[in-house]
Amino acid sequence: MRSFKLPLRWNFKKVCKIATIFVALTSVPTPASHEHCLSWMGSVMLWRKGYRSDFCQAVQTINFSEWRLSESVLLSSGLPLDDERRNYIRTVPNAIFSIAEPTPLKTETKLVALSHDVLVNLLDLRPDDCEKSSDFMNFVSGSSIFKGSTPLTHRYGGYQFGSWAGQLGDGRAHLLGEYRNKWGQRFELQLKGSGRTPYSRRGDGRAVLRSSVREFLCSEALHNLGIETSRSASLVVSDDPVIRDQFYNGNVKAERAAVVLRVAPSWFRIGSLEILESNSEIDLLRELVDYIIYNHFHTDTLKSKNKFVEFYRAVFRRTIATVAKWMTVGFAHGVCNTDNFSLLGLTIDFGPFGFVEEYDPDFIPNTSDDGGLYRFGNQPRVAKFNLDKLRVAISPLLDPKEKEEVLKIYQSFESEYQKDFNAEFRKKLGLFNELINDNFLFTKLLAMMRQTKSDFTMTFRDLSELAELNLSPNLIPKSNWALKDLSDHKDFAKWIKSYRERLSRNPANITDLARMSTMQAANTRYVLRNWMAEQAIRHANEDDFSVVRKILKILQNPYSKQSTAEESGYADRRPAWADNLKVSCSS
């Protein structure tokens, strides 16, 4: 593998500073560009580096007809490809990828929705042009690929529901290529639902509209909640029939085929390494880990002689951070297999996920999870299990001392996770400093919420919207319905007293207004509840895509109260018709 060293008198901070100045100075308007305001996150980046960003910066976007994929880092790296070029289902040895082209849909495709944020800020594309471009539709539906590009499907394995499943791989996904945008960020573009691959096993390589709507909306929702995740650029649907037994109960029916264009810095996952260790392909394991470190963890390992140890530490930290944030927004992934855990700490592969409504740590979003292994409250334990499997997968690359170091990192999981969890919950409760008994305040609140079946999202939001003087059982208005439910608990008054006492121990300069503002920035008002997704799916099945687009727009700004969302009841109790909604692994 190539090695990279900074000049002796340089350091990483200096490189970042120069790069930031370059990005800021080179992103100037041109006659051919569409102007878009610099994103909030981009403004923060410049502010942290000491540069003003209180201006609307022009972001250059282009039509799809002018847009091209960048040179493939994956292909130029020399990572081995499967020698077999025919596309049939098989066991693939000694390779990271197989070459396979998407299978075009047979019937007319329709555009369900676009993420303007992904198109503009990640891919430099003009959404209004993409909506009208037949070439864009052909690209995102898998009907055509760029001349000279090489679509790839990834080989990986994984532990599924606690048991080793052997070779898995991209059974219905095609990596179309890579794109490096104007900011210098590199992304891999992948279609999901685009046809059979060598890794399809018993599947047909397709995805249905039902699951595709959910993935499209949820990946964008998590991003706007501040959670690391893959992104979705587009969603298209056709009338091609896809046969599914949604709940595995013999009720087989034809559903509509759909394709999502997914975007991520990398699609490598724990299972990418497991399959190589399991098959004793150690040289290839070393080559792949070297590639991942060089391209995605270079700064984490820059000053270390033990790059594999620091690689493990970085994946460990990213995974904990992501799972802790899942837990503090009430997100249950549903299928936390090692093949669904990204090495970059991204949330990937959305299936039977769900957001907790009535708080219950035993909430199981996936009806296929009979034993409840991936229930909401068990996600931290599953993350620890998965990180142990990563430890085992890289162990052939470690000497005895490095194995001990990695084991120590792994054994610190509980304490490290608790730190992240507590830090997130302090934000949710408006606590600006750390006190030793804070965890008791959190656990008692969650216990009361469970016993009263209080809504997870709205209970915390209600707390953020009431002034401290109104935090009393007799003063909670009916409009704060979730907190009103909680106030029925016999210990609520006592807990409120403890909470107010704890607020009094915030730093002296923290006003109640500052507390409320901070809490509202940490407690979303809207999440993608299953009934909202179901509403969008039902309309989309009738070619009415307005609800998908409405929900996407609302979830782009989930922390702010929005009239359209309020009128739609998205901050209200679940409607009666949705009481028995279920989701499964069928997609």
Image: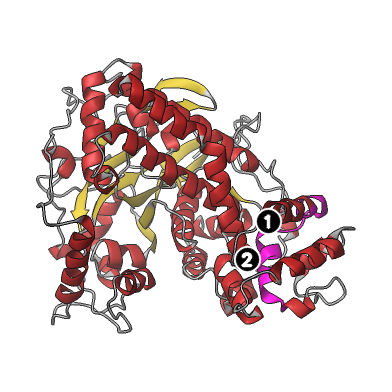
Judge whether residue 164 can be spotted in this image: yes
Magenta stretch: includes residue 462: yes
Which image quadrant: the N terminus? top left
Of the residues shown, which amino acid type is indicated by label 2?
Leu
Residue 524, placed above or below residue 352: below
Identify the residue under disc 1: 438
Find residue 241 and report its image quarter.
top left
In the rendered image, the residue lying farthest to the top is 280
Who is closer to the viewer here, 300 or 295?
300
In the rendered image, the residue lying farthest to the bottom is 55
Who is closer to the viewer here, 221 or 402?
402
Q: How far apart are marks 2 and 1 (CA)?
A: 9 Å
Magenta stretch: includes residue 484: no
Q: Which of marks 2 and 1 is nearer the N terminus?
A: 2
Of the residues shown, which amino acid type is indicated by label 1?
Asp
Q: Which mark is residue 431?
A: 2
Q: What stretch is highlighted in magenta?
A: 448-467
Mark 2 and 1 residues: CB-CB less than 8 Å, in contact?
yes
What residue is shown at x 67% (from left), y 64% (from top)? 460
Find residue 334 and report its image quarter.
top right
Q: Kindly report the secondary structure that dominates the magenta region of the rendered protein.
A: helix
> x, y (%) of residue 349?
43, 43
Residue 140, placed above or below residue 567: above
Q: Could you tell whether 286 is left or right of 233 in the image? A: left
> x, y (%) of residue 474?
88, 74
Judge whether residue 202 can be spotted in this image: no
Residue 295, placed above or below residue 431: above
